[in-house]
Amino acid sequence: MNNSDIYLYNRNISKNADYTVWLAFPGIRSFALSSLGYLWMFKDIDTFDDVNIEMLCTDTKTTKNRIENVNLIGFSFTFDTDFLSIFSILERFSIPLKSSERGKDNPLIFAGGPVVSANPVPYKEFFDFIIIGDGEDINLKVVEICKSCKYKSKVEVLEKLAELDGIYVPSIVQKKVQKLTKRLESCVYTPIISSEAFFSNTFIIEMARGCANRCGFCLASYMNLPLRCAPYEDILKAIESGLKYTNKIALLGAQISAHPKFVEIFNFIDKKIKSGQQIEMSVSSLRVDAVRPEIIKTLVDAGQKNITLAIEAGSDRLRKVINKNLPKEKIFEAVKVSASAGLKGLKFYGMIGLPTETDEDINALVSLAEKIKKNYKSFDISFGFSSFVPKPNTPFQWIGREATKSLEQKAQYLKKEMHKLGVQVSVSSIKWDYWQAVLSRGGDGFADFLIDVYKNGGKLGDFKKSAKQHKINSDYYALGTFDFGANLPWDFIDIKPGKEFLQNECIKLLET
């Protein structure tokens, strides 16, 4: 931390603690300072009277605490390839990568976050324990237990942790691990505002967690069910608090428009702007049905020039298959409202390679872009695409990806055809998405494969080379369509809705 950081909570900086925690972020400090979940966990542990906590990032030059004095290291695990940065941090401090190779002089190592909550199995040999699900409450219990057992053996500490719901201890056989779901009884917001953050001096407020729409491919929806909204009064108080320190606020959530007071929250901000207060506001994205004149006008008044709309697919048919019931007329209406309310442009997010996709569905994306450009010549539109990646605990977890070559041909076709229309297109790396699918649905026996990927440099070619060396059938994990009766690596996680519901939902959607 440095002098440019503003703490919105009371720190106990004169601690005489004999227990030290490093909270590690597998990325650079500016990204850590814009990660709401990471910062909130840091804040919670920082308020402990007798625990020292230090932020650790990939670009941390020096640490206040020596590694031999660190008792516990927690890692945020948000993206599939975060293991590369996690390994580099462990190696930097001469900590063996595998838990089984660490001795009593090494700190306990744990992880939490969406990747390991969905499927921790490929990474289980690297962590002493893993938090499954929402970690806000359990984090504090974990630190309390670890601190109280400081002088006990590693086995004794882990046995005690394994008794808690939401804690997966790979070295202990657990038939089921309950996924934790927190009630949003209060508002989660940025506890540290920094000019060095990627979103500089921005106060982020979580309005809602989860999404009730349940797109068949969407991990963010299914892992975070049910949809929960922060209390309205708490959100208003958080906005008032944040505006004392910065004029930049951001509203976060997969489905913020589902908040029962969504319009009222925007009206509250709009009144402040109209009274002369300078406010810059942004939103993560909006559903098409949330694009209303008063909402867009508030965003424009708050300085936003473009917003992102997730349409996922080009045709009404394919959107129904993925459970996104969004007719194209609604999309055109959203464009009309956005342009007339003063936005300069829209970015559409879509996905290629979705189950049952045909050439007609791809062409429908081009037709959609063509019609919008024809009717709104001066309106800036762009498209961003990723390719379908089957994710655990979703209805489409059983469905394999389309072949890489075929997906790359679709991506090139979209780029070429939309370029003719004057529409910008960005497509995620199809080859990287392939390996993301391998990691997402991976199982036992991945540890040495992942270590070799890291040791060889972590590039695309290193994944292929290491998989071959360790006899990992990557096509099975990425392209294979699994039988409904198959045992999946992550089946031991007790999560709702359960496997039977997901199977029925998958069948229903594919028959749409």
Image (cartoon, grey):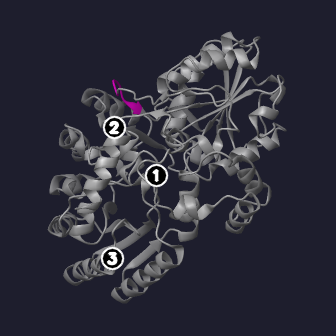
Q: Secondary structure at mark 2?
A: loop
Is the residue marked by circle 1 packed among few (<14), some (14-19), or many (20+) residues within 10 Å?
many
Q: Which residues are the magenta region?
A: 184-188
Residue at image point 23% right, 59% down: 288
Which residue carries the number 1 mark? Answer: 391
In the image: residue 407, left or right of residue 446:
left
The secondary structure that most of the magenta stretch takes on is: loop
What is the CA distance from the residue labelled 3 to the residue labelled 1? 21 Å
Q: Nearer the viewer, residue 168 or 136?
A: 168
| Residue 379 in the image: above or below residue 188 | below
Instruction: Name the residue rendered at 26%, 42% in the picture.
Output: 269
Sequence-first tag of 3 and 2: 3
- Amino acid at pointer 3: Thr
At a point 58% along the width and 40% down the height, the residue shown is: 120
Secondary structure beneath dot 1 equals loop
Q: Which mark is residue 84?
A: none
Report the amino acid beneath label 1. Lys
Q: Position of residue 18 (x, y in %)?
A: 74, 14
- Residue toward you, 473 or 216: 473
Which residue is denoted by mark 2 in the rendering? 497
Among the 4 quarters of the image, the one containing residue 204: top left
Crowding at label 2, few (<14), some or many (≥20) Cα neighbours within 10 Å? some
